[in-house]
Image (cartoon, grey):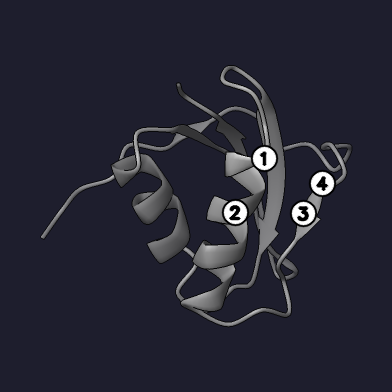
Amino acid sequence: LVSISIHLVMTSPDFPDPQLDLSQVKCPLNFVKAKLALEKRPPGSELIILLPNDLTMNVPQSIRQEGHTVELLQESDHGLLIRVIRQG
């Protein structure tokens, strides 16, 4: 069992719009799409991702295992909104 550290940074309804909406994409394809989107960005940039409610913790955990920083922005009935900071 691997623990994942996610920091709650925002819970208000006016959170940023997702740059990558994966709310209709099932696992493991949502992780693959998130990983490809991160690879296109320069180190230090951020990506806001909206994930579906089902098994949402798998994607943030996998992204962290890739070495990136993950912050939880919002969790709701619509899904999980995370901010990913791309590492070098």
Q: CA distance from mark 2 to mark 3?
A: 11 Å
Q: Are marks 2 and 1 in contact (CB under 8 Å)?
A: yes
Residue at 35% x, 42% y is: 66
Q: Which corner quadrant of the image does residue 51 belong to?
A: bottom right
Looking at the rendered structure, which numbered label has been put on residue 36? 2
Q: Which residue is mark 3?
A: 20
- Mark 4 secondary-structure assignment: loop
Q: Earlier in the sequence, mark 3 or mark 1?
A: 3
Looking at the rendered structure, which numbered label has been put on residue 70? none
Q: Which residue is mark 1?
A: 40
Residue at 60% x, 54% y is: 36
Looking at the rendered structure, which numbered label has been put on residue 19? 4
Q: Amino acid at mark 3?
A: Leu
Describe residue 46's horizontal placement relative to residue 14 as left or right.
Answer: left
Q: CA distance from mark 4 to mark 2?
A: 13 Å
Q: Earlier in the sequence, mark 2 or mark 3?
A: 3
